[in-house]
Image (spheres, helix red, strand yellow):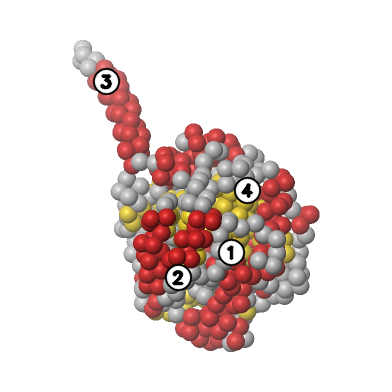
Amino acid sequence: MKKILVANRGEIAIRVMRTAKEMGIKTVAVYSTVDRNSPHVKFADEAVCIGEAPSNQSYLRGDKIIEVSKQLNVDGIHPGYGFLSENAEFAEMVENNGITFIGPGSKAIRVMGSKLAAKEAVSHYNIPMVPGIDKAITDVEKAKAIANNIGYPILIKASAGGGGKGMRVVSHADELESQMTRAISEATSAFGDGSVFIEKYVTSPRHIEIQIMADTHGNVIHLFERECSIQRRHQKVVEEAPSSVLTPEIRTKMGEAAINVAKSCDYVGAGTVEFLLDADLNFYFLEMNTRLQVEHPVTELITGVDLVALQIQVARGEVLPIKQEDLQIKGHALELRVYAEDPLNNFLPSVGNLSTYRLPKGEGIRVDNGFEEGMDIPIYYDPMLSKLITYGKNRTEAIQLMLSAIANYQVEGVQTTLPFGRFVCEHHAFISGDFNTHFVKDYYAPEMLKAQQDSEAYIASLVALYQYEKDQQVLRIPNV
Ligand code: MV4
């Protein structure tokens, strides 16, 4: 593989190209008209404009991207995350054009893209799943019987769903019919597939995912877990590795289950198997994400493995260069997603110009960044500016590093989630490790950031007054 095209933008495009360069592989960036001056364009060896700002005219134009790849003699396409990364038709089209898709085969993408197909695929392996059904259901009476059997509360999920879309909690039998009707119509309009199924609702779970990597020779390894429970409306905010609650035994069991999920769909490449962990530390398979994830750096830091390098190696058909027994967890890593969103105003996107933009640096600090000072943040895409990642010898050190990195991250011109990250890292529930997916809902209110900022402003005003009075004393020395 001599030349890779990255079908993405921002920090992930740069992240992928960094490793490609280290491996002596040439890089091609694609960009939309609003991104013409973006860092990912400058970072690449070659760059091609593929269309107008809206994603469906640029970053989602698989046909255009393949055409460019052929013109420039590209031999591998890395999709990053989002955009075309989990599009089975695109993966297939890339391969049909004689180009390597740096990701799993289209079959695995398709199976794992459907929750019901995924349940069916893994059913032949002994993988723990939440009590529920593994077939689509439309008949309300049947649904009532099943729900009574499982016991309330239950959760209605859309088979084609993702990111919590099409999910409905039902606490009593008398709400079942109306919630089911809504779930079906929501799934139909959002995904063009109205299939829904029922599961027992796990009330206060943690979200823990296992990173796996598979080659084309049947070898599959896992690279331990990431704890992703700190999320807001299905949008992850802080991720870490390792989780503070897993015992070595549970970690091994979850790792083995994740490997079996990968085997169930003949997986190749980097993938993530999501689990729910209940209060008694029982784990249940949820779904598999068939891409490199946003939060992959925390895994890289605790294992010392470059996941993009492994993706490229297995895409070239090489045997995985590491074995399970070679891997061990060292230290602790935290990641904060820095969004141009206003935590004081319901996390509304805060687009504008980055009039000041300076990144923290130092030992134990990694910033996967896609922006630079003076740039406008386009309204067309996800408003994530960067990922602030810290690595310490233990969790306490990683948290302290995160707090100092947040303090040294200078942004003016837009509001960001940095103050929110500080709120999380200073919160006793986060520090103690005793939290679940309800953390943000349970503990966060904008008033808390306002109170923090007001008290800082008050202290600053005291310091200013003190300095003023000192200056006055000097100035008041009578002129003799
Ligand atoms: C669940 C659940 C509780 N019980 N399934 C949310 C998105 C999708 N990936 C699955 N999700 C959930 N499935 C059962 N049976 C709770 C969630 C859930 C959640 C999961 C992971 C991270 C954050 C979450 C926030 C709310 C709900």
Q: Is residue 56 above or below residue 390?
A: below
Per the model, the C-alpha gap separating discs 1 and 3 is: 63 Å
Q: Which amino acid type is shown beneath numbered disc 3?
A: Glu
Distance from the alpha carbon under mark 4 to that under mark 2: 30 Å
* Res. 138 mark: 2
Please state which of the two labelled residues, at mark 4 or mark 2, is closer to the viewer: 2
Q: Which residue is mark 1?
A: 288
Please, what is the three-letter code of the amino acid marked with disc 2?
Thr
Q: Which residue is mark 3?
A: 469
Q: Residue at x 70, y 61 (%)?
A: 126
Q: In 3D space, how far apart are the residues under numbered discs 2 and 1 (Cα atoms)?
A: 25 Å
3D distance between C-alphas at marks 4 and 1: 18 Å
Q: Please tell me whether mark 3 sits on a helix, a strand or a loop.
A: helix
Q: CA distance from mark 2 to mark 3?
A: 75 Å
Query: In the rendered image, which residue does mark 4 sit on?
Result: 282
Q: Earlier in the sequence, mark 2 or mark 1?
A: 2
Give the quadrant of the C terminus.
top left
Residue 443 disc label: none
